[in-house]
Image (cartoon, rainbow, N blue to C red):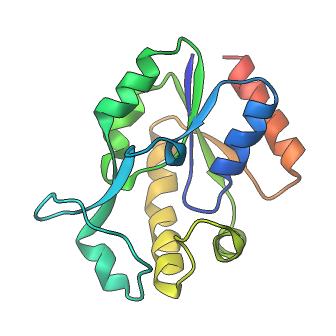
Amino acid sequence: MKILITGVSGTGKSTISKALKERGIISIDFSDVHGMCCWKDLTTKEKVQYSPIESLDWFNNKNFFCDLNKLKEILDQHKNIVMTGVAGGSTMEYLPLFDKVILLQCSPEIFTHRMKTRIPIYGKTKAEQENAINWQKEFDPLLISQGAIPINTEGNLDDVINKIIQVVTTI
């Protein structure tokens, strides 16, 4: 079974991937695969170097994409795998590669707080936080309409992991 765990920045994807690995479940985070995802200019399709973004305007013609060939290569190597990650520009292209999709959700207050206090650089600026808030309003309903299973990540991590393991092991 191939499972995707996704959600906007700060919903807990990387933390959950690590916790699943600790429990013996094969889990790979997109961010741990060199070259899996990158920012691209929507007009030129060229890769764009990321640095902290101070203006929401930057996001009008840039998006975060997943390398579908790399993703397929990883999926082909495993009969059962959980992958965690998100790439907005190619989400609808890679969803069909998975048997089930779990959508991590939490309030904008929670995920922006997490983004401000975590190690990855994305999410530290006001523009990046506003972009994530705006994107969640589109992304979550879209994924739910495609059959994603929503799981709230505002509670205790062990409780969230147990909910995810129930979904993963009962499929």
Q: Which percent across, then down, holds residue 39? A: 32, 61
Residue found 52% across the figure and 46% down from its top: 85
Say which quadrant the C terminus sits in: top right
Quarter-wise, where is residue 1 in the image? top right
Q: Is residue 131 visible?
A: yes
Please tell me how many numbered marks the rendered image carries. 0
Is residue 106 left or right of 8 when viewed as pictured? right
Q: State whether residue 69 is above or below residue 103.
A: above
Q: Which percent across, then down, holds residue 115? A: 63, 71
Is residue 71 left or right of 117 when viewed as pictured? left
Is residue 123 left or right of 47 when viewed as pictured? right
Residue found 53% across the figure and 84% down from its top: 125
In the current view of this chain or complex, which residue is farthest to the front? 34
- Between 111 and 78, the one lying in front of the other is 78
Residue found 72% across the figure and 41% down from its top: 18
Q: Which percent across, then down, holds residue 94? A: 36, 35
- Between 100 and 127, the one lying in front of the other is 127
- Between 124 and 51, the one lying in front of the other is 51
Residue found 37% across the figure and 46% down from its top: 35
Q: Is residue 164 visible?
A: no
In the current view of this chain or complex, which residue is farthest to the left? 44
In the current view of this chain or complex, which residue is farthest to the top? 79
Q: Which percent across, then down, holds residue 45? A: 15, 57
Q: State whether residue 87 is above or below residue 97.
A: below
